[in-house]
Amino acid sequence: MHNQDRRRLDPNALGWCIALALSAAPGIALAQDAAAEPDQRKPSATLETVTVTAQKRVEDERKVPAAISVVGEQQLESQHVTQLSDLNGYLPAMTIDDGGTPGQTSVSLRGIPTLGPSAVVAAYIDDTPLGSSGNLARSGAFLLDLLPYDIERVEVLRGPQGTLYGASAMGGLLKYVLKDPDLDAHEGRAGVGVSNVKGADGTGWNARASVNAPLIPGKLALRASFANEFTPGWVDNHFSGRQGINDTHQRSGLASVLWQPNDDVRLKVTALHQRIDADDNSLVTLDALTLQPSFGRDATGKPVRERFEKQVDYLAATLNWDLQWADFVSATSYSKTDLLQVNDLSKTYGPVIPAILGEPEGRSVFPLTLGLKKWTQEFRLASKSEGPVEWLLGAFYTHERSTNHQSASSESLAGVPTALDPLLVADLPSSYREHALFGNLTYKFSERFDVTAGLRYASNDQSFKQIISAGSLADVGVTPGASSEEVVTYLLGSRWHLSDDDMLYLRVASGYRPGGPNIALPGVPPTVDADSLVNYELGWKSLLLDGRASIDLAAYRIDWEDMQLSASTPNGLSYFANAGSARSEGIELTSAFKLTPNLLVGFNASYTDAKLRDQADSLGGAAGDRLPGIPKWTMAATADYNFALPAGMSGHVGGSYHWLGERKSNVDSNPQAVSLASSGQLNLNADVSKGRWTLRLYVRNLTDNRDYSAISPVFNGITGDLREWQAVRLQPRTVGLEFDVWF
C-alpha cells in the first residue's frame, strides 16, 4: 500500500595496474557470440549468424521481421555483467532503472516506462515466463535479474509482443536463454576472480563452476553450474557510523537434464535457484533545496538499515516433438519468488511523533514482504517452414498466488516503540488466473514477399483481500476485491526480401497489461483497467560487404491508452489509477562491422520522443510533457580485437562505451521533476589464453563517472513538504582479475 519503493584491497595497487594495462586496447568491445574453450577461438572474415527464438521458432535473427537485440555469453563475461543495470544504455531504446541493488530493477523499452506497479516488459527463461501478471505482486520494480553465468544469450525484443507472449509484454520481452546439455561431450569449467571497487570497504570476489556429463551418450545428459558473486559496499552511513553498508551477495545454481530417445523427441528439465542478499542499498542523501550531498558524495544518514533479499526457485519441463508434418511443444513451469525490502520511512512518518505525542522525532521501519507462486502451461503446434503457408497455434494457462505483507512502525531513534506503534499492519493476498488462445499465419506470395497475421484471446480472473489488522493510516478491517477481463491482441506484418541479404518489414502489433482489483481506500475506484498500446513499425535489415557488415534500422510510433500508474493519498498510501494516453516515436540503429578477421566493431543508437497526449493528474503532468526516465538519445560503441601471442598463446582486448542522454525523474509539469544529466560509461577488458585456461582483466567505469542514474523525492507525511532527495549513482570504477580453466 505504501508508495516506496571487509576485506580491504589497495586501489592504487591492483586497480591502477590493471587499468593501465587495459588502456592499451585499440578499441571498445563487441565480444564473440559464444564462449568456448580458449583454444577454440578462430577468426572468421564474416559476421557470425545469430540464432534466436523470438517468434517461438528457431530462426536467423536477420530474418526475423521485428527489432531484436542479442547479448551473447562472451559479451556478458568479457564485460563482467552481473546484473541488468550493467547493460543500461548498451542496447537501443532500452533504459534500466536501478533501485540501489541487483533485483530492484525496472526496464523500459521504446519509451514505455514502468509508471505502475506491474511490469511493462515480460521476463522469460527459455519458453516460460517468470514474475507476476497482477498488480499486487509489484513485478514492475523487481524484474527478473539473473546472475548471468552459464547462460547462452539474452534476447531483447523491442515493441509489444502481446500475440505470442501475452500479458505484460506490451513494451517488449527480456528472455534468458540457458545452455542445453550436450549429449556427447564431457566438459567442465571452473573459475575464480577478485575485484576492487573504488572507495569500497573490502575486496570483491567471485567463484563459479559448470559441468556437462553425458549419462547415456547421444540420449541423456546432465548440465549443472554454480556461481557466487560478492560486491563490497562503497556507501557510508553517517547516522550509524557504518562504512560500506551496501555489501551484496549473489548466488546462482542451475541444473538441466536433456533426454533425447530419438531424433524426433527432446525433453529438457531445468531447475534454477537464484538468491540476492544486500546488507543495504546504494541510495545517497541529497539536500531538499540544493540537491547537493547531505553527508558526502557516497553517504547517507538514515537510522534504518534497508536490507534487500530476493530468492527465485524455478522448475521447468519442455517437450519438443517432431510430428513430421508439424512441431509440437509443451512448456511447463513452476516458480516461487520470495522478496524482502526494508524501507526507511523515518523522514515521512517520523514527524508524526512530535505532531501527536509531543516527543522527539523518531524513525519508521517499513518492511515489504512479497511472495509469489506461479504455475504456467503452454502447448504449441507449429507447421514446418516449407511451403507457401506457415502457421502456429497455441494455448496458455497460468495460475498465480501472491502474498503482500506491509507494516510501518513508529519508534524512537533508539528503536523503542511509541504509543502510535504500529502505524500500519496490512496483508494483501491475491490470486490471478489466465487462459489464452493464440495463433499466427504467414502466407508466402513468393520467395521474396510474405504477409503475417496473428491473434490472441485472453481472459483473466483476479481476487484479493485487503486485511488491515492494526494502525491508524488505514481503517482496520477486511475488504475483498475481484475483477475479470477479456483482452484481444493482434499482429499484422509483411516482409520483403529485396535480396538474399536485404529485408524490409512492416509490423503493426498490440499489447496490454492486465488491470485488476484496486486498494480499498476512500474515493478510490474498486478496480483499475488494463492499459494497452499499438506499435506501428517499419524496419530494414541488411548484410553488407560480403557478410562483413550489418545494419538494422527501425522507425516506430506507439500509441498508449489508459496508462496504468501508481497514485498516492495525502498520508502516503498508494493505489492504482488510469490516466489518459501517451505517444512514443523513435528510430533505432544497430550495426556491426568485421573490419578484419580479428577486429569487430559496432555502433548502436536510438532516438525516442515519448510524451503525454492528455493531462495526467496522478503524475502532475500536462499534454506534451516528456515521460519520466526516458532519454531522447542513447548510444553505444563497441570493439573487439583478437591476436596471436608467442608460446602458443592468444590474446583479446576490447571494451564498450555506453551513453544515455538527459532525462527527467518525473513529467515536465511536476514541480518535483529533476533532470538527470546525460551520462557515459567506458568499460575495457583483456584476456590471455593458452590451451585450456584464460586469464581475464576488466575495468568497468574506467573514468569513475559518478553521475546519478536515479533520483526520487521524500516528503513529510504530515505537511507534505519536501524533506530530502534519495539518489543512486553509477557504481565506482571497478577493476577485476579472473582466471578460468576448462577440463
Image (spheres, rainbow, N blue to C red):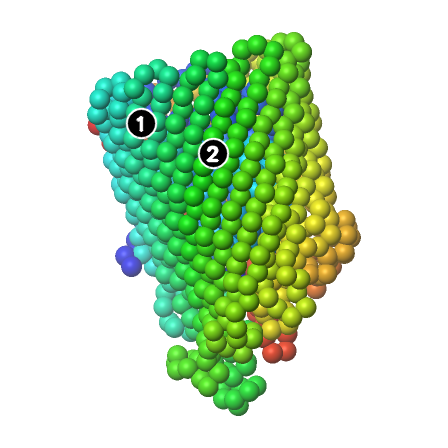
| Left/right of residue 598 with respect to residue 606 in the rendered view | left
Check the picture and name the quadrant holding the N terminus. bottom right
In the rendered structure, find residue 378 and report the number of the disc placed on it.
Answer: 2
Amino acid bearing label 2: Glu
In the image, residue 346 sits, relative to residue 539, either above or below, namely below
What is the C-alpha distance between the residues marked 2 and 1? 19 Å
> In which image quadrant can residue 577 be found?
bottom right
How many numbered marks, from 0 up?
Answer: 2
Give the percent coordinates (x, y) of residue 16.
37, 46
Check the picture and name the quadrant holding the C terminus. top left
Q: Residue at x 51, y 21 (%)?
A: 382
Residue at mark 1: 258
Of residues 546 and 702, the one nearer the viewer is 546
In the image, residue 651 sits, relative to residue 485, either above or below, namely above
Precedes in sequence: disc 2 or disc 1 = 1
Give the percent coordinates (x, y) of residue 708.
55, 55
Q: Residue at x 38, y 73 (%)?
A: 240
Give the percent coordinates (x, y) of residue 712.
58, 61
Q: Residue at x 64, y 36 (%)?
A: 489
Q: Callout 2: helix, strand or loop? A: strand
Amino acid bearing label 1: Leu
In the image, residue 450 sits, relative to residue 519, either above or below, namely above
